[in-house]
Amino acid sequence: MSQGDFRAALLDPDLPVPAGITDPEGRPAPRRFNVYRNNVTVSLTEALRQAFPVVRALVGEDFFTAMARVHLRAHPPRSPLLMLYGEDMPAFLEAFEPVRHLGYLPDVARLELALRRSYHAADADPVRPEALQSLPPERFLASRIAFAPAARLLRSRWPVATIWAANTRGGPQPRAAVAEDVLITRAGYDPEPALLPAGAGPFIAALMNGENLSEALEKAPEFDLTATLGILISGGAITGIS
């Protein structure tokens, strides 16, 4: 029996118990294996339930449980840390035929993944607001920004921030399928997604790619720079200016 055969049987209850599974007396032990297999399936399914609460709310509990079991057979864990399990969920949702009509679902999963990565990211001290305010305009425009490890940018052609807020905080449902750019920051213990002003996504993306403020402004259409900087500062997203 290979490790691959054992893993496949462990994740798929339709497969037979692998040969060679015995109890301490050397007798076949299919019931023990089936209990172990069920415990693994339940644990991985619960890990996905905790990782994707909004996806779960959007498709329903029963459907999510069935979908999670399909997912875990196609994408078994690659790490012993269950907090990292589910990295493949967005790509899985894009290819999973029963939800192909829910085009926004993969990006909702990406937002939930980004929030989880932000939560587990390293701590970093933000710059003081006065450090930005004291820079002369020419130095400010020539500056490059260092971002906190917890900062994440998600650019979506769907209203993912509005969908997330509607299913976690009782916010209004989106009125139209409009694109939204979301910046995730972690000023305290828990990460928060902030809906960026229209046009700010390319600006933040350019800054995260290492371009200075002047270059980043050239990459973006007209947008509310003051509001965008306010989101960065209040979220503790800026840790250095060079």
Image (tube, helix red, strand yellow):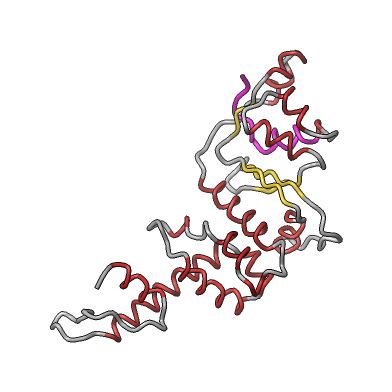
- In this orientation, which residue lies closer to the viewer: 72 or 4? 4
Task: Please indicate whether residue 36 sits to the left or right of residue 99 in the image.
Answer: left
Q: Give the range drawn in magenta.
A: 227-242
Q: Residue at x 77, y 15 (%)?
A: 137
Task: Please indicate whether residue 185 sits to the left or right of residue 140 in the image.
Answer: left
As for residue 79 lying within the magenta part, the answer is no
- In this orientation, which residue lies closer to the viewer: 33 or 238? 33
Q: In which quarter of the image is residue 99?
A: bottom right
- Residue 27 appears at what percent x and percent y? 17, 86
- Residue 76 appears at what percent x and percent y? 43, 65
Q: Which residue is drawn at 86% across and 61% down?
A: 175
As for residue 240 lying within the magenta part, the answer is yes
- In this orientation, which residue lies closer to the viewer: 92 or 41? 92
Q: Is residue 181 above or below residue 136?
A: below
Q: In which quarter of the image is residue 111?
A: bottom right
Q: Is residue 203 above or below residue 182?
A: above
